[in-house]
């Protein structure tokens, strides 16, 4: 999925996510815990990705 111009990929069978730049460079890996709260994970990842895209100078399309 795309969030704030970054690609977010869930690592299979976990609530861990890799965050990638548009060029494919991994800039973060976030573990959210094994609580099954996927909707809350997406909201939290939105805040994290917004901050990371600002830091890396990536404009959301």
Image: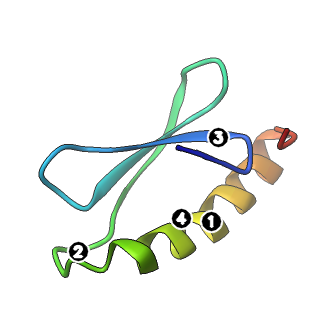
Horizontal side of residue 32 vs 51, given as left or right: left
Please tell me whether mark 2 sits on a helix, a strand or a loop: loop
Mark 2 → mark 1, Cα distance in angstroms: 17 Å
Mark 4 → mark 1, Cα distance in angstroms: 4 Å
Residue with the mark numbered 2: 33
Residue 25 vertical position relative to residue 54 in the rendered view, above or below: above
Residue with the mark numbered 3: 6
Residue 58 vertical position relative to residue 31 in the rendered view, above or below: above
Mark 2 → mark 3, Cα distance in angstroms: 21 Å
Q: Which mark is residue 46?
A: 1
Please tell me whether mark 3 sits on a helix, a strand or a loop: strand
Residue with the mark numbered 4: 45
Mark 2 → mark 4, Cα distance in angstroms: 13 Å
Please tell me whether mark 1 sits on a helix, a strand or a loop: helix
Please tell me whether mark 4 sits on a helix, a strand or a loop: helix
Q: Position of residue 40 (x, y in %)?
A: 44, 80
Q: Earlier in the sequence, mark 2 or mark 4?
A: 2
The residue at 77%/40% (across/down) is 56
Mark 4 near mark 1, Cβ–Cβ under 8 Å? yes
């Amino acid at each position: 999925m795309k969030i704030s111009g970054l690609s977010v990929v869930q690592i299979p069978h976990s609530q861990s996510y890799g965050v990638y730049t548009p060029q494919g460079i991994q800039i973060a890996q976030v573990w959210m815990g094994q609580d099954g709260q996927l909707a809350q994970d997406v909201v939290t990842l939105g805040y994290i990705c917004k901050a990371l895209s600002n830091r890396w100078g990536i404009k959301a399309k």
